[in-house]
């Protein structure tokens, strides 16, 4: 009401506006005297708190690639120790002029192999795992740049949703793209002997060199049915988030520019981004909590020796 009077007072006068509002609405409206008293008191405590929270919300939204909606913003504020309700968060986000970002249709980059794919489906659309390094999902997506297409390969741990391996290249060749992501994932893993690797029927994942690497690391390959994105839904979701949260936000010059930005996005995804499927925790927090309760043999040995 105060802001409404502020907007039109120079055209109609405070007394006229207040009298008109009182005539057309029953009670509860401010008088000219009340308006002047309110202006002399300055902003209320609620208005001041709202202003501080709006500024914080804008900063959080910007720091998280502008993708957080009401639910995640609410959880971020609560994690920061702010007592706030979900509806209030939505109201303040509207005041701040920010909102979440929904995913678009995922791209198709699968090239069918010429040979028969004999890998079984060991996942059956159940992308749950009892711990880290039990189930990895892998897929490839593309990025359009000024100089041509760039391809990105990701390997994601189903337990923590952590991207454990990734690679970028202007070629979709196995050695240049998915194998590099797989090598990175294996190098960072604590153990791979009981691990299942799930991917689509793309020729890169059926290739001899890729499967030789899986066998060498003691990893069991798995795949779903042909042409069914739901059979690799978790990997598709990572691709969709990558495109929605990073790639579709700007025009890209070349592979170097995309690679630098992808490194920053993966770091954010693993260490700062809240995941609804993880109870609004980060992949890093989930893994730290797991290893604190189920330490590796190496960790136990180090504790004993210490």
Image (cartoon, grey):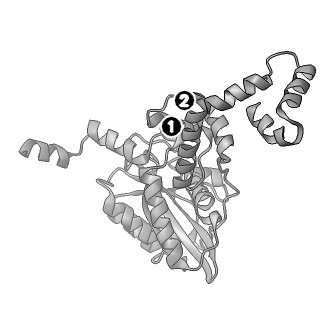
Circles 1 and 2: CB distance less than 8 Å?
yes
Residue 23: percent from left, percent from top: 92, 20
Residue in front for this viewpoint, 135 or 88: 88
SS assignment at label 2: loop
Which quadrant of the structure image shows residue 46?
Answer: top right
Q: What's the residue at 47%, 54% (across, down)?
A: 269
User: Is 301 rendered above or below residue 113?
Assistant: above
Identify the residue under disc 2.
84
Q: Earlier in the sequence, mark 1 or mark 2?
A: 1
Q: Quadrant of the image for the C terminus? A: top left
Work out how far the residue at label 1 is from the one at label 2, CA to CA, in angstroms.
7 Å
Residue 14: percent from left, percent from top: 82, 32
Q: Is residue 299 left or right of residue 97?
A: left
Identify the residue under disc 1.
77
Residue in front for this viewpoint, 150 or 192: 150
Q: Is residue 295 left or right of residue 126?
A: left
Residue 57: percent from left, percent from top: 56, 44
Which quadrant of the structure image shows residue 291?
Answer: top left
Residue in front for this viewpoint, 76 or 118: 76
Work out which residue is located at the far top of the displayed protein and give it: 27
Q: Residues within 10 Å of mark 2 (few under 14, many from 20)?
A: few
Q: Quadrant of the image for the N terminus? A: top right
SS assignment at label 1: helix
From this viewpoint, is residue 125 visible?
A: no
């Amino acid at each position: 009401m105060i802001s409404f009077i502020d907007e039109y007072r120079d055209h109609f006068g405070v007394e006229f506006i207040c009298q008109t509002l009182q005539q057309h609405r029953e009670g509860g409206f401010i008088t000219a005297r009340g308006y002047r008293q309110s202006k002399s008191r300055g902003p209320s405590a609620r208005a001041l708190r709202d202003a501080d929270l709006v500024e914080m919300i804008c900063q959080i939204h910007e720091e998280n690639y502008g993708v957080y909606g009401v639910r995640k913003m609410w959880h971020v504020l609560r994690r920061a120790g702010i007592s706030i309700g979900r509806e209030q968060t939505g109201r303040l986000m509207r005041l701040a002029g920010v909102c979440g970002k929904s995913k678009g249709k995922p791209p198709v980059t699968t090239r069918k192999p010429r040979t028969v794919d004999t890998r079984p489906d060991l996942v059956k659309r159940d992308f749950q795992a009892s711990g880290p390094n039990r189930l990895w999902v892998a897929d490839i997506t593309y990025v359009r740049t000024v100089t041509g297409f760039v391809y990105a390969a990701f390997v994601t741990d189903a337990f923590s949703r952590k991207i454990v391996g990734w690679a970028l290249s202007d070629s979709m060749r196995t050695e240049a793209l998915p194998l590099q992501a797989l090598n990175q994932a294996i190098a960072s893993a604590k153990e791979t002997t009981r691990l299942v690797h799930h991917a689509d029927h793309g020729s890169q994942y059926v290739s001899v060199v890729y499967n030789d690497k899986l066998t060498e690391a003691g990893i069991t390959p798995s795949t779903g049915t042909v042409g069914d994105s739901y059979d690799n839904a978790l990997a598709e979701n990572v691709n969709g988030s990558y495109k929605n949260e990073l790639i579709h936000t700007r025009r890209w010059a070349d592979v170097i520019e995309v690679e630098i930005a992808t490194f920053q996005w993966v770091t954010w995804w693993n260490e700062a981004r809240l995941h609804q499927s993880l109870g609004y925790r980060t992949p890093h927090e989930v893994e730290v909590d797991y290893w604190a309760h189920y330490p590796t043999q190496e960790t136990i040995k180090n504790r004993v020796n210490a």
